[in-house]
């Protein structure tokens, strides 16, 4: 058996950053930026009023000074005349400021009579003008990879006048659940069968990260069924099987995959849950065989597959991030394998979520973290700082 960190090293070695593609701006949210992007214009491209009011020469804006209103500027509609002494232009927020003007008197600080305004409050010393390029300037690089594009980034890209965006291609995952005991949700299992759940939970996990998941038909415990389903993985960037990766008489995945060209990188990891994990490359495509127990598969998805996917999308090759949390109750000593305990973080403290059997999805569903314990971790008392991985 190898350690979790050694398994991650192997998995990162199997993966490579995917190529990039151009997508419409409307489809870029949540995608990973592939190239640095510069502004194609300044923002604002002209000096603009930040208030509704009157544009004047600042040196004339004394208390009780009077101005003749000679025009109007609104957003999208500039005023092209020449400001003379004693003249003002009615201006609205976002409108281009006329040439020769360096102050906007807000409308609350004037009285208007016909076409003449009188300054009744000169205490506001602000110019109320946004200079051209105050947000960003033409040619300025504003976004660089690695960067998962947020709603704010999308707004910025629109202002930068980018209609299309270079993003990393979405990883395509071929997901295969295996086993004669499985039927799909909604079907009627006979007394010896159970409902397939791993493929749905894992698909939801990976799609939340931005991957495209192809949930393939359940592969039965025969060589012919497995080979038929493996043929459907063409075009995938990552192949994931669930179950059948152990060494029992009905665990056929490793042998069938080897027949189809898989070069195995490792088998078995010193962790719980998730010991019967294998990985390799099948005809150039990375393949990971996850354990069949529901919690084991989901934990391995968090610990191994998510970091792989992030690496494929251009992010650094790093393990799942950990946080330090205060232990809410005593914990007995751990065994020889690294343990990822289903746990609950509440009010800044962590406690195990109950029975740690790898088949109990109810325990996983009420958990919001994995409490990570190293091999042979001794008895830990309440109040100890522990490592944890948060669950999305």
Image: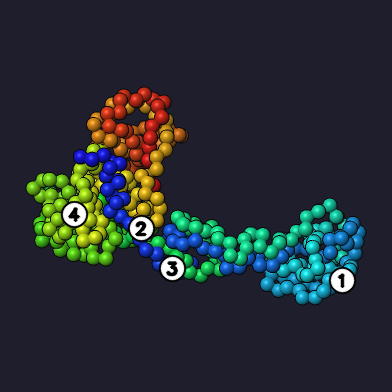
Residue at screen point 25% across, 51% down: 198
**SS category of the residue bearing label 4:** strand
> Which one is in front in this view, the residue at disc 2 or the one at disc 1?
2
First along the sequence among labels 2 and 1: 2
Residue at screen point 68% across, 72% down: 76
Image height check: is 137 above or below 248?
A: below
**Going by the image, does 199 lie left or right of 26?**
left
First along the sequence among labels 4 and 1: 1
First along the sequence among labels 4 and 3: 3
The CA distance from mark 1 to mark 3 is: 50 Å
Residue bearing the label numbered 4: 263
Image height check: is 352 above or below 197?
A: above
Q: Which mark is residue 24?
A: none
**Going by the image, does 338 lie left or right of 321?**
left
Residue bearing the label numbered 2: 17
**SS category of the residue bearing label 2:** loop
Q: Position of residue 221 (x, y in %)?
A: 12, 54
Residue bearing the label numbered 3: 23
The CA distance from mark 4 to mark 3 is: 35 Å
Q: Position of residue 141 (x, y in %)?
A: 55, 60
Q: Is residue 358 visible?
A: no
Between residue 139 and residue 334, name the one nearer to us. 139
Disc 2: CA contacts within 10 A as few (<14), some (14-19) or many (>=20): some
The CA distance from mark 3 to mark 2 is: 18 Å
Do the residues bearing badges 2 and 1 touch, measured as CB atoms within 8 Å? no
**SS category of the residue bearing label 1:** loop
**SS category of the residue bearing label 3:** strand
């Amino acid at each position: 058996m190898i350690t979790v960190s050694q398994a991650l090293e192997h998995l990162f070695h199997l993966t490579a950053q995917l190529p990039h593609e151009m997508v419409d701006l409307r489809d870029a949210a949540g995608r990973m930026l592939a190239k640095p992007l510069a502004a194609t214009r300044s923002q604002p491209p002209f000096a603009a009023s930040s208030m509704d009011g009157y544009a004047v020469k600042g040196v004339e804006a004394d208390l009780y000074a009077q101005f003749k209103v000679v025009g109007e500027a609104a957003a999208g509609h500039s005023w092209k005349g020449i400001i003379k002494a004693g003249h003002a232009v009615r201006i609205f927020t976002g409108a281009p400021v006329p040439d020769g003007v360096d102050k906007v008197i807000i409308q609350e600080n004037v009285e208007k009579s016909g076409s003449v305004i009188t300054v009744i409050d000169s205490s506001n010393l602000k110019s109320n003008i946004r200079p051209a390029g105050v947000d960003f300037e033409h040619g300025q690089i504003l976004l660089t990879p690695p960067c998962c594009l947020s709603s704010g980034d999308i707004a910025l890209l629109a202002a930068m006048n980018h209609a299309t965006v270079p993003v990393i291609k979405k990883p395509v995952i071929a997901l295969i659940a295996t086993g004669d005991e499985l039927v799909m949700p909604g079907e009627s299992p006979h007394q010896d069968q159970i409902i397939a759940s791993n493929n749905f939970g894992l698909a939801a996990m990976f799609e939340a990260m931005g991957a495209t998941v192809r949930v393939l038909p359940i592969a039965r415990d025969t060589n012919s069924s497995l080979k038929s389903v493996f043929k459907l993985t063409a075009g995938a960037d990552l192949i994931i099987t669930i179950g059948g990766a152990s060494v029992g008489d009905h665990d056929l995945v490793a042998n069938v995959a080897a027949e189809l060209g898989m070069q195995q990188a490792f088998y078995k990891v010193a962790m719980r849950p998730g010991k019967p994990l294998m990985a390799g490359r099948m005809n150039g495509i990375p393949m990971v065989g996850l354990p069949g127990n529901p919690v084991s598969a989901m934990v391995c998805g968090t610990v191994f597959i998510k970091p792989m996917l992030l690496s494929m999308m251009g992010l650094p090759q790093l393990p799942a991030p950990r946080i330090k949390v205060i232990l809410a109750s005593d914990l007995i000593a751990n065994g020889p394998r690294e343990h990822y305990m289903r746990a609950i973080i509440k009010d800044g403290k962590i406690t195990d979520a109950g029975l740690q059997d790898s088949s109990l999805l109810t325990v996983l569903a009420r958990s919001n973290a994995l409490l990570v314990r190293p091999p042979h971790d001794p008895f830990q008392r309440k109040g100890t700082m522990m490592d944890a991985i948060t669950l999305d």
